[in-house]
Image (tube, rainbow, N blue to C red):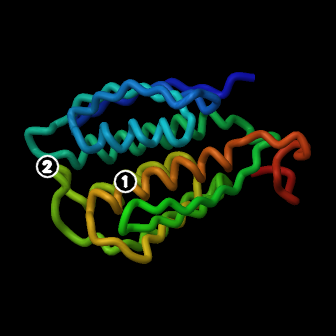
Amino acid sequence: MERKAEIKRETKETQIRMKLNLDGNGTSNINTGVGFLDHMLDLFAKHGFFNLEVEAKGDLHIDAHHTTEDVGICLGQAFQEAVGDKAGMRRFGSFVVPMYESLAEVNLDICGRPYLHYKTPLEYGKVGEFDIELSEEFFHGFVNHSGTTLHINVPYGTNQHHIIEAIFKAVAKALDVATQIDTRISGVLSTKGSL
């Protein structure tokens, strides 16, 4: 069974088209109008082995907030659709990614219960034109619409670009682990029988 999704979202603030294939090879075609976000989504696809296409138009004359948040929402919706009933899926994923002086630790559960724990040295500032607090907004959108419990911890790091890049890579790798099909699992991995 193909685990794919196609999402369309149109509001007064953004228009987004997205295609996701969980069982891909890491190819991507990303155009959000936000250069740093494009870079993060490219490496997210590459390191998660997801095929990802994103075309977004947003109110960038204001700032990148709505575009970044709404792309996170769409990615969450795409994951929720693509995993389907979660039968045979490992569900849990963890990964640690070093990025030079920074270290990102990610633990997640694709369980239907959205929750984000986000603890990093990041405060305020920019990477290029990208407001660094938008990284957290992106992942809020993702967890709320994918039903994922996501814990992101960066115990140390000083370069803002490195910290955010390590986070996106670690989330991608953890999602790759969690979405893998395990032939030992009958139905969903839960004693309740459903997720």
- Using the image as rendered, state which of residue 7 and residue 181 is in the foreground: 181
Q: Amino acid at mark 2?
A: Glu
> Can you tell which of label 1 and label 2 is closer to the viewer?
1
Tell me the quarter of the picture where residue 109 sits.
Answer: bottom right
| Label 1 to label 2: alpha-carbon separation | 15 Å
- Using the image as rendered, state which of residue 139 and residue 96 is in the foreground: 96
**x and y percentages locating residue 68 in the rendered image:** 29, 45
Q: Amino acid at mark 1?
A: Glu
**Residue corresponding to mark 1:** 165
**x and y percentages locating residue 13 in the rendered image:** 22, 37
**Residue corresponding to mark 2:** 129
- Residue depicted at 76% across the width and 49% down the height: 90
- Quadrant in which the N terminus appears: top right
Residue sitting farthest toward the front: 100
Q: Secondary structure at mark 1?
A: helix
Q: Can the viewer see residue 34?
A: yes
**x and y percentages locating residue 149 in the rendered image:** 58, 60
Q: Can the viewer see residue 140?
A: no
